[in-house]
Image (spheres, rainbow, N blue to C red):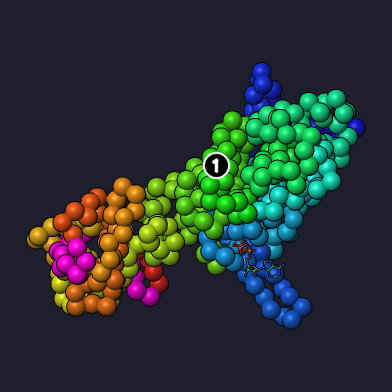
Amino acid sequence: MEKVSTNVTDVGDKIIHQSVDVRLQNLTKVFFEKSGKKTVAVDDFSILIPAGKLIGLLGPSGCGKSTTLYMIAGLHKPTAGSIFFGDDDVTNMPPEKRGIGLVFQNYALYPHFTVRQNIMFPLENLKVPKEEALKLAQQMAELVHIGDLMDRKPSQLSGGQQQRVAIARALVKRPRVLLLDEPLSNLDARLRLQTREEIKRIQRETGITTIFVTHDQEEAMSISDEIVVMNYGIKQQMNHPQAVYDEPVNMFVAKFLGNPPINIIPAKIVGGQLTLLDNTVLEKGFEIADQEVMIGLRPEYFKIVSTGKITAQIEMIEHIGRDTMIICQLENAENTIRVIVPSAKNLTVNQKIKLNATKFFIFNKETGERYK
Ligand code: ATP
């Protein structure tokens, strides 16, 4: 009889995973289609995911997130590169031997099985004795807070509850790594928020190394210990969410994170001076060759002050919770910018205001590379 992997210790009613780090080394996946079309879905991708961490793999549709996840799962064979779980090279290991739990967007539960049968299903394949399987299934159900729903069928559950069943089923085999592919996309806004907090709690309690794929930057920022931003199959940046937000390496990352989004404004460097296109000087003393650049200013990087260097006219005022967002038109430029201010008192539509930037990024206009 095949033994259930032993990378879990029971400590009272807590289930602690012996977590492993996951290392992707120069991972590449090229799809060749019959028509001759070639797609480089993942391109020389290297990251180290520390043991016990939750990593958000984030990027726009088609950037290679799922392909990366499926290579880690063993469902896609890499064209080049290696995958390690701890010291274990799993690159050519079949999926069932890797010790992974996989959760999909559409839950993929068996509709005619009860919750209990769904959770126990992977254990049947492993021929775990029934008594033990029942105990493990109950333990996992308690962990994801559905212990009282074991006799229901999936159709009798909400979307969030169904996703918890899928997570319990993925965890019951006691995997080394948990892989989540857009697990919240089918849930409504409130459930999505609740379930993402649940996932974070379950991950913390089990300590299992987890990779979470999403195209939703807010979701990735809120749930992840670190995020990896991808574009065109290429790693752009990996760091703590706040660090990526505060110090993006390029214009793509700066634009991809943030809601409301960052303002990108054309500007130029002339003789070390950064000026807007109407020649308003923003700052001096840059060691950057004369050229046109793009500057990035997050909406909260502005201050309204009477001595401000940037002149703008208010077009719209929106209340967004505690703060206020004003949308204004830059004077002598075609750009509309979003500015977040703590209070809109004394501000009216059509009013002219003066702004100073408390922080900004300078990007290469062509490559998006960040200069400052
Ligand atoms: P989404 O968020 O839309 O799921 P993604 O970031 O997960 O996108 P992937 O599904 O990994 O992106 O796809 C990356 C690229 O590889 C895309 O251009 C896609 O069309 C292509 N691709 C994925 N699977 C295949 C396949 N089996 N054959 C050919 N091309 C594929």
Q: Quadrant of the N terminus?
A: top right
Asked whether 114 or 7 is in front, the reply is 114
> Dot 1: what SS?
helix
Q: Is residue 259 in view?
A: yes
Asked whether 47 or 340 is in front, the reply is 340
- Residue 158 is situated, as x and y percent measured from the top left of the image, at 67, 45
Taking the image as shown, residue 286 lies to the left or right of residue 48, namely: left
Give the residue furthest to the right: 1
Task: Indicate the amino acid at tag 1.
Answer: Gln
- Residue 145 is situated, as x and y percent measured from the top left of the image, at 65, 32
Within the magenta stretch, is there residue 358? yes
Within the magenta stretch, is there residue 186? no
Give the residue furthest to the left: 307
Q: Quadrant of ligand 1?
A: bottom right
- The magenta region covers 348-366
- Rendered position, 139 above or below 125: above
Taking the image as shown, residue 111 lies to the left or right of residue 300, namely: right
Give the residue furthest to the bottom: 35
Q: Who's the residue at 64% across and 24% down the image?
A: 14
Tell me the quarter of the picture where residue 318 sits. Answer: bottom left
Q: Quadrant of the C terminus?
A: bottom left
Which residue in the structure is indicated by mark 1?
A: 194
Q: Who's the residue at 69% across and 54% down the image?
A: 106
Asked whether 262 or 372 is in front, the reply is 262
Taking the image as shown, residue 98 lies to the left or right of residue 113, namely: left
- Residue 225 is situated, as x and y percent measured from the top left of the image, at 49, 42
Tell me the quarter of the picture where residue 202 sits. Answer: top right
Q: Is residue 21 in view?
A: no
